[in-house]
Amino acid sequence: MEEYGAEEAESKENIWCRETVPKVFKIVCCTLPLSNTDLVSLLLASPSVHRTLLSCQPLWEVLNLRELKKAGNRLIAALSLPRYRHVKQINLEFARDVEDTHLMLIKDKCFSSLQSLESLNLNACQKISDTGIEAITSCCPQLKSFSIYWNIRVSDLGLQYIVKNCKHIVDLNISGCKNISDQGVQLIADNCPELESLNLTRCVKLTDEGLMSLLPKCLSLRSLNLYALSSFTDAAYRNLGLLSRLKFLDLCGAQNLSDEGLSCISKCKNLESLNLTWCTSVTDEGVISIAKGCTSLQFLRYINLRNL
């Protein structure tokens, strides 16, 4: 009798370890924002946990190598594994050792693993140039979100590769890419009609011509960041009134923006957030037009408006 009881207890323990524990691990992994390093460590917990976690495809759709050393080599190694063959998000932000050669190797060895990729973050990866962008975007036909802020090696040619290879871009961040010119913005205008979010912060080569070519063609924009772009004038700002879906607009440092330009922006009825910090030409009249026209506005920042 005692022997039977011991066997039953052992059987229950085996069931617990084989079935219950893996299910708990799966719930935890799907609920908490675990890093890829943590997930890989959990694979070693037991064979049952290993099988259960590998069977949960959503766990392996995100590859986060943010700020990690040797991220380029880690990325190549990860994409070579079957569990990452349907990855949808890759984050390499501040992974500063990532170079063009890594992205070219991925194109050669892991091309099929990126066919479902929707989001790619290369922010502050300053060793990447247009060559690397061409290589990685050629693998990502489903890419929707691309971010590569603060990279002075990226030029209009890089944008040409992006719009050529990725036909579904809705979110583009090229903040601080100081070699982007009006020609690059024209490429965006001509090829990204469904664009919803665009960050052009500190793209200092841009002129009115670039913005005027962009706005009439990207009418789906909901978020537009024009921070620290002091060269634009009302000639370009007038077209902001065309963006009926716009919710977020950052014009910090728009020194040439006048009340006339603001009156056009006031046509953006869905605008919820507006930054007018250091818009030194704006007066009470312009702010009043925003207050009357932008009826959805929830946040207005207007530090250092000297004429108020």
Image (cartoon, rainbow, N blue to C red):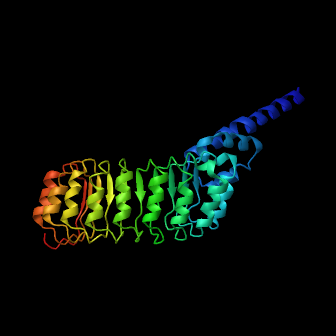
Which of the 4 image quadrants contains residue 299? Answer: bottom left
Quarter of the figure with the N terminus: top right
In this picture, residue 268 sits left or right of residue 178:
left
Q: Which residue ends up furthest to the top in the rendered image?
A: 1
Q: Residue at x 32, y 68 (%)?
A: 206
Q: Residue at x 40, y 50 (%)?
A: 170
Answer above or below: position of 127 versus 85. Answer: below
Q: Position of residue 264 (x, y in %)?
A: 16, 56
Observer able to see residue 160: yes
Q: Residue at x 34, y 59 (%)?
A: 186
Viewer-closest of 121 and 283 = 121
Observer able to see residue 68: no
In this picture, residue 120 sits left or right of residue 188:
right
In this picture, residue 289 sits left or right of residue 278:
left
Q: Position of residue 168 (x, y in %)?
A: 44, 47
Viewer-closest of 156 and 227 = 156
Q: Residue at x 60, y 55 (%)?
A: 35
Viewer-closest of 177 and 52 = 177
Answer above or below: position of 241 versus 182. Answer: above
Q: Which residue ends up furthest to the left in the rendered image?
A: 285
Q: How many marks?
A: 0
Q: Position of residue 286 (x, y in %)?
A: 13, 62
Q: Position of residue 240 (x, y in %)?
A: 23, 56
Quarter of the figure with the C terminus: bottom left
